[in-house]
Amino acid sequence: MNRTVIEVERRQMREDAPDFLVGDTVNVHIKIVEGDKERTQVFNGTVIARRGAGTREMFTVRRIVQGEGVERTFPIQSPTLLKVEVVKRPGRVRRAKLYYLRQRVGKQTRLRERQATKAE
């Protein structure tokens, strides 16, 4: 990419970029504007993908609602994204994209937990 494009992107990046990985269970706080009212909506689920870089970076969160899978994709640099809370950090995620979770139902969707070491 062009140096000027990279420099402009760097100035537009947010300082409080959330720190999470694929496989983490997260609560995503989003600002919803309805007419003249604002409210915060929380979408919780498992991060199944991260893609892009810089201001174009996005992540996909999946959860099961009433037996139906629901996925939402969020831009990390969006001003409507208020914060991302990491609820659970499993280990043993050996893929960059967890699209295989789309075919799993029930207990099969759980990811293996990381074993705690003495250092942790």
Image (cartoon, helix red, strand yellow):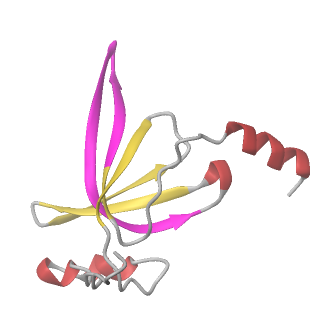
> 19 above or below 55?
below
Left or right, residue 68 beside residue 73: left
Quarter of the image holding residue 48? bottom left
**Residue 103 coordinates in the image, percent (x, y):** 27, 82
Q: Does residue 94 appear to the left or right of 38 in the view shown?
A: right
User: Taken as a whole, is the magenta stretch helix, strand or loop?
Assistant: strand
- Kindly give the residue lying farthest to the top in the view shown: 36
Above or below, 46 against 107 in this view is above
Asked if residue 54 is positioned above or below residue 33 in the image, the reply reads: below
Q: Is residue 19 magenta?
A: no
Residue 66 in the image: state x and y as whole percent: 9, 60
Decide whether residue 43 is among the magenta residues.
Answer: yes
- Magenta span of residues: 28-51
Name the outermost residue toward the right. 3
Residue at (42, 61) in percent of width and height: 60
Which quadrant of the figure has residue 20? bottom left
Q: Residue at x 24, y 62 (%)?
A: 63
Q: Residue furthest left?
A: 66
Residue 3 at x, y = what percent? 90, 51
Q: Quadrant of residue 21?
A: bottom left
Residue at x 52%, y 42% (from the top left corner): 16
Residue at (21, 79) in percent of width and height: 110
Report the side of 41 relative to 91 (left or right): left
In the foreground, 16 or 38: 16
> The C terminus is located in which quarter?
bottom left
Viewer-nearest residue: 30 or 66: 30
31, 64: nearer the viewer:
31
